[in-house]
Image: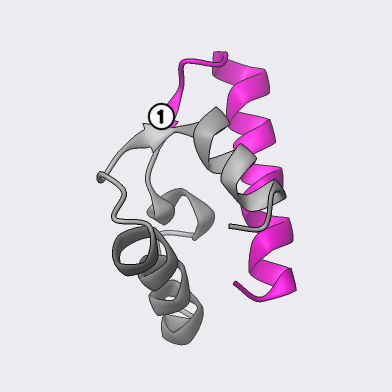
Amino acid sequence: MRPALRAKAIAICEEKIAKKGEGVGLSFYAFFANKNDDPELLMEAAEWWIRTHALDHFEKAVKILDMIQSGK
């Protein structure tokens, strides 16, 4: 995962957790606006989420945050 996507994903996870608590779930779509303005970055996130880690559509934000921060 490229550094810019990693930083954005961390910020989004932290924001969601702060607003809704540690039980909040999210999908990789949470890292993007409702427009497909960067399809390569979207596919990179999808690849990391689906193919690399075989995650469910929705996962706990704390789990994703931990994975990203630990370099998985």
Looking at this view, is 18 or 6 the one in front? Answer: 6
Considering only vertical position in the picture, is 26 above or below 62? Answer: below
What's under tag 1, amino acid-wise? Gly
- Whether 11 is among the magenta residues is yes
- In percent of width and height, residue 53 lies at 37, 57
- In percent of width and height, residue 32 lies at 49, 60
Q: For this view, does 42 lie left or right of residue 57?
A: right
Residue at image position (39%, 55%) is 29
Residue at image position (68%, 33%) is 14
- In percent of width and height, residue 67 lies at 58, 46
Q: So how many labels did they put on this image?
A: 1
Residue at image position (51%, 78%) is 41
Q: For this view, does 4 lie left or right of residue 46?
A: right
Considering only vertical position in the picture, is 36 above or below 14? Answer: below
Q: Dividing the picture into quarters, in which one does residue 52 lie? A: bottom left
Q: Mark 1 = which residue?
A: 25
Query: Over which residues does the magenta segment extend?
Result: 1-25
- In percent of width and height, residue 35 lies at 41, 69
Residue at image position (46%, 49%) is 30
Q: Quadrant of the N terminus?
A: bottom right
